[in-house]
Image: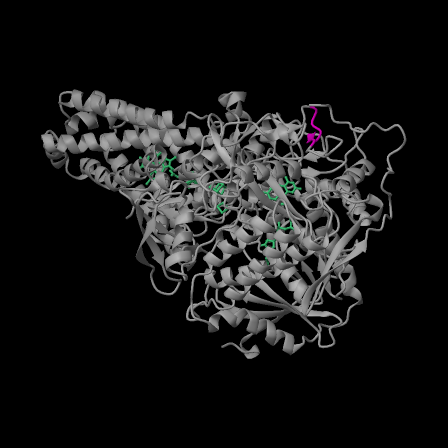
Amino acid sequence: MNEMHLYMAQRLSALVMAPFVLVHLGTMIYAIQGGLTAAEILGRTQGSVFWFLFYGMFVVAVSIHAALGLRVILSEWAGLRGAVLSGVSLAIGLGLFAMGARAVWAVTAGGAP
Amino acid sequence: MFTTKDIDRHDTDILILGTGGAGLFAALHALQSAPEDTRVTIAVKGLIGKCGCTRMVQGGYNVALGGGDTVERHFMDTINGGKWLPNQDMAWRLCEQAVVRIRELENEIGCFFDRTADGSLHQKAFAGQTADRTVHKGDLTGIEIISRLMEKVLAHPVEKLQEHRAIGLIPTRDGSALAGVLMIDMRTGRFRFVRAKTVLMATGGGPTMYKYHTPSGDKTMDGLAMALRAGLPLRDMEMVQFHPTGLLAGDHTRMTGTVLEEGLRGAGGQLINHSGQRFMFDYDAKGERATRDVVSRGIYAEMRKNNNPEQEGVFISMAHLGPDHVRQKFAGMVKRCADCGFDLAAGKVEVVPTAHYFMGGVVVDVDTRTALEGLYVAGEDAGGAHGSNRLGGNGVANSTVYGGIAGDVMGADIRGMGGLREPDETVLEAELARACHPLTRTPDLVQPLRAKLQNVMWEDVGVMRTEAGLKRGLTGIAEVSDALMEVGVAPDNLAFNLTWHDWLNLRSLCDISEVIAKAAIARDNSRGAHYREDYPEPGALEDSYFTVARQSGDVEVTREPVAFTIVRPGETILPEHEPETLVAAQ
Amino acid sequence: MPEISSISVKVARGGPEGAQRMQQFTVPAYESQTVLDVVTWIQQNTDPTLTYRFACRVGMCGSCAMMVNGVPRWTCRTHVDKVLKNGAMEIAPLRNLPVIKDLVADMDPFFDKWVAAEAKHHPSRTRDDPIPAIDPDAPERLVASAGIECINCSVCYAACDTVAGNPDYLGPAALQRAWTLVNDAKDSARDAILDAVSGKGGCHSCHSMGSCTAYCPNELDPMSAIAGLKRETAKRYFRGRAK
Amino acid sequence: MKAVARAHPLWLAYILHRLSGIGLALFLPAHFYVLSLALTDAARLDAFLRFSDLALVKLAEFGLVFLLAVHFFGGLRLMALEFLPWSAQQKTWAAAALAGSFMISTLFLMRAI
Ligand SMILES: Cc1cc2nc3c(=O)[nH]c(=O)nc-3n(C[C@H](O)[C@H](O)[C@H](O)COP(=O)(O)OP(=O)(O)OC[C@H]3O[C@@H](n4cnc5c(N)ncnc54)[C@H](O)[C@@H]3O)c2cc1C
Ligand code: HEM
Ligand code: SF4
Ligand code: F3S
Ligand code: FES
């Protein structure tokens, strides 16, 4: 991965996320009225292929995006370089993805018929 | 103190001193013409491309590019402007090669000069030109030329000795050739002797021994002082060009002396004295639009009349042209003045004539060779191309043209040369001792002496001269020179010790000031930049001579007749019926 | 000119070995006085060992830049009035470059990166060819011309936090020059330049923090130039993919 | 850290974008964790959601949405600057990004309360 690829991956993942963020924010604002319950959330998402894909892609994009964003910050502010830097950012990316995938699975897969 | 054992020794093939237009072009051409794996080394008092005057060029670059203008016309203007004193072969080569050099600058170096709407180069006419000839990039032409040259050179495999100050030309024991150059690595304060088969001196003269001067601070006549000590002949040393409008802002600021551009007067700027009167028409029918030397003398005379230390200079006033118009047309100048606290657009700014360019220099042939084998000189350090006056726009043309030639010639000459030459160790030791002299004296301030020299030169060896004044000037110079030998610099911290270098600067300036004064005494007529109140006439053009100064013990000045190798006074090489000027009257 | 009062100046002293320390000086104030004049006065009158760098004294050579009260400036064109705070100021060598001594920074890294950015003309013609006609108002030319008055003073380089954090970053001035060349009809190596600015520390490292543009004494706009490079390299990236 | 040439809007926009990015990256794992509770322990998710009714937690959430909004608009601003041909409107963009994010987060807060 050279600079150019990293840069494009960061920007493209951001672009991918843009509509997700809008929808997500919108849903949240709508949903939050009158308080949130687990059932409410799960009722909306569980078993929905749409939300599965929606949040699934969101998680993939955000894992890439945040890992690359933090990579730059770790290099500029913490002085990490080379293999250490790559290792740490890969770990961040994979970690985020794993946690995110679990969450998506939790809210969308559970109640599927 | 130091002995020759303390000198770091270093070898190269081609050594270039200075990175103005001459030095940088020489480096590029040397790389093109020399055999492969020739070592090229650049040594410079500042940073590569960031010192010297080529960067400061405002108005532009003279070159005849057709549209009615011809090399012949450029040449005739140069000869007329130099009042028939130029070395005609050098002037011819300058005008002829400028055409090639400008194409090289645009096509190979990557400069972009201002265009007209049809895409061709824009050319304008400086005073003293009979065609629109000056190529430019706004009024910051030098930045474009030197930045492009600099990035080219930086990208090439040349050895870079930055902040290395040359202090002595060291010949071989029999004195027949140059062995190398002694320098100070300014950053560490250590001495370094660099042997080279060929050395180009392109340190750019610089008449900074005057109270008011325009050149960059690193230029202090080091090159000419070194050449003088090496016994080389220097010509036209009385010829100091003054620019009429230098900023006057007090002697505690380095802004004083810096140029307010020529175009201000061209556009209708008025010169006003302290009683509020416009005075230039008392001196010349063209008023403020007269040539540099005439306006400089007019201002100088006015200042002398006024003779009030509180009211030193005169004022340039632009406001009558409409402040907004001025702000727009001279944006750079207005901003520069504003940064210094002056309002050029709506107010008036105090100005005085300021020493700008040095026509004198080492005697060279058209290939930049000198009398000393292995030493070449180009740019403002070389004398001859301009005679008694340099036309605006011919300075940077001269340094780029001859710098390139020097590179070509050195690259070719080196093929026929044997190995490196052994230096005369006694000369090396003497030059070392010279530089170390202040380190053995009680430390004291250098600046008051520099100020004193600058006053002496301004008062007595300046814009208007008389024999009595020049002699008084010589006494003053000698006083400063002697006093300097008693001023010391503390030897404990020589790394980047500017005060040591101030001392060495003043040493060079004293040495060359003496030559200027003596050459000015030797010329008992008035030509171009040299004006003798006691001999106001130019003398018969057919009997034109130039001065040659040499040091062998004392400095002696002789006269040599100008050889009219191409055109004789009263004649022209322009075809018959050519109009006198192609410039539309203003 | 009469002395008005005096200025209290703290100046960074010392070389590369050992940290710099601040030294206090009192300098007479004058009506027309630049920061360079203040430093000069100290060297010429009180401490002959003080080291600084200048050449042209009119804002053309770009060798006199220093940090004045924490801000990078060309000192020869900075009037004291502009920076004085309660009669005092603080002067230090340019940020993001190694210190040689006192107020003098080593500019070599700045210029090494200039070279690394392929920021030099790649000829498409020789001295034997005519000078090409170029419309000065063509859009590409206007873009190229916007950046060409750079005096390589390194003020932008000192202002940029990305330079501070990323030793490979080529920096605003070199990238701006590269962008000028990309838009220069006379340059023959557009791709080589775009390659050079796409590598490690290239234009993609810039976060558009804009300090370069905010502090450039010549009012140039390296930030936009770098954005131009990002745009152009991204376009090329997609074109490369599409093939 | 001593102030070095940072007192201008674009630098503030940059630092805001970076800090909000870090903030989001730190929050994200927590967010994922809470959601994945749905899989393991729906009761605790509910408990958490009730807990989020507290004013203090509301404020924290407001902060998060604020971060996301700041970062979102900041990121769009950045990509507009990079990919759309340059216009001198940059500072306006920066201001608009801030204003927009403020609006959204206030909206969120007002609806939630
Ligand atoms: C303000 C100003 C405006 C000008 N405008 C114009 C114009 O519009 N048109 C025009 O044609 N001409 C103009 N000139 C004149 C022109 O700049 C010079 O004639 C020309 O640039 C000289 O070039 P050079 O290479 O000989 O010397 P410079 O460019 O002056 O370079 C000299 C070099 O030698 C170095 N040096 C000096 N001493 C030593 C030493 N001891 N050891 C090592 N290196 C040393 C210097 O640091 C510098 O790098 C102007 C000059 C000034 C000052
Ligand atoms: C959907 C909307 C988002 C967009 C448009 C977006 C856009 C961007 C952009 C363009 C950058 C590059 C900044 C730079 O190079 O200076 C960036 C950096 C960053 N983003 Fe995002 N982002 C978004 C969402 C997120 C999310 C949800 C997170 C967190 C999890 C995040 C974390 C980061 C981080 C940590 C950086 C690094 C900041 C820096 O380098 O200064 N982003 N973002
Ligand atoms: S872009 Fe401006 S600040 Fe940067 S080096 Fe060039 S002139 Fe100096
Ligand atoms: S300050 Fe630095 S981060 Fe980019 S916009 Fe300028 S180069
Ligand atoms: S001394 Fe040349 S830019 Fe300041």
Q: Is residue B462 left or right of residue B492?
A: right
Q: Is residue A36 visible?
A: yes
Residue A37: quadrant of the picture: top left
* Ligand 2 picture quarter: top left
| Residue B207 makes an appearance in the image | no
Residue B402 point in image, percent of width and height: 73, 51
Q: Is residue B255 above or below residue D42?
A: below
Q: Is B404 displayed left or right of D71 in the figure?
A: right
Q: Residue at x 63, y 29 (%)?
A: B282
Q: Position of residue C149 (x, y in %)?
A: 55, 38
| Residue B183 covered by magenta stretch | no
Give the left or right position of residue B31, taking residue A25 as reference: right
Quadrant of the image containing the C terminus of chain A: top left
State the scheme by which the image is colored. Answer: one colour
* Picture residue at 69% right of the left edge, 54% below the top: B521
- In this view, the residue in front, D97 or B512, is B512
Residue B28, x across and y down, in percent: 68, 53
Judge from the rendering whether residue B424 lies leftward or rightward of residue C116; answer left or right. Answer: right
Most common secondary structure along the magenta stretch: loop
Residue found at the very far right of the displayed protein: B576
Query: Nearest the camera: A3 or B354?
Result: B354
Q: Which residues are magenta?
A: B118-125
Q: Is residue B122 magenta?
A: yes
The one of B440 and A91 positioned closer to us in this rendering: B440
Q: B62 or B532: nearer the eye?
A: B532
Q: Position of residue B5 (x, y in %)?
A: 55, 79
